[in-house]
Image (tube, grey):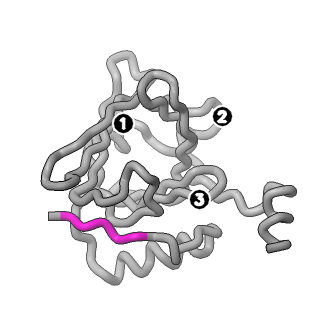
Amino acid sequence: MFRNFLKKCLHIGKPVTVTQVDVGKYCGTWYEIASIPGRQQRRCTNTKAEYTLESGGGRVLVRNSCRRNGKEVSVKATAVPVEGSGNAKLIVTFFGFLKADYWVIGLADDYSWAMVSNPSATRCWILSRTPYPDEALYRQFLDKLRLKGIDISRLTKTVQG
């Protein structure tokens, strides 16, 4: 308990982002492999995110979707890179006014997978270009997240398909 208090007071343990994200390469479809789910994600399957670079290149249009109770549900948002972050930190705005910080904390050289967290490491997503990465790769994700201070015991694997 004292360690958590100290961690919050000193801002220790924020996950470190990757140094650079090529937004054009990052755009496209990402399948959620696992997450520390928020309330709105509970009971979701077939979760994916689709990113499209807005003409002019300043913002990324986001569409998050999943199946809940047999029906597809989705939400749209916009993402703007934080200046000076190498595009690794994004401010995502939902419904025009709800803002959330998303940090890219892991990224394959070929952009085949990504790991995203919020600054407090209370939310996390493992994303892949394919819905079914192999189990060995999944274990590597867990090891990487553990080293970045993410509580992997809170991760839930996402059912795809």
- Badge 2: residue crowd in 10 Å (few <14, some 14–19, many ≥20): few
In this view, the residue in front, 91 or 140, is: 91
Please say if 23 is above or below 119.
Answer: above
- Residue at x-position 14% and y-position 64%: 161
| Residue type pointed to by label 3 | Thr
Q: Which mark is residue 24?
A: 1
Q: Secondary structure under badge 1? A: helix
In this picture, residue 14 sits left or right of residue 112: right
- Please state, as top left, top right, bottom left or bottom right, where the N terminus lies in the image: bottom right
- Evaluate whether residue 128 shows in this view: no
| Residue type pointed to by label 2 | Gly
Q: Would residue 38 be counted in the magenta stretch?
A: no
x, y (%) of residue 117? 54, 54
The residue under label 2 is: 84
| Residue type pointed to by label 1 | Gly
Please say if 24 is above or below 67.
Answer: above
- Residue at x-position 41% and y-position 81%: 139
Q: Earlier in the sequence, mark 1 or mark 2?
A: 1
Gap between marks 1 and 2 measured at Cα: 17 Å
Gap between marks 3 and 2 measured at Cα: 23 Å
Gap between marks 1 and 3 measured at Cα: 27 Å
Tell me how many marks there are: 3
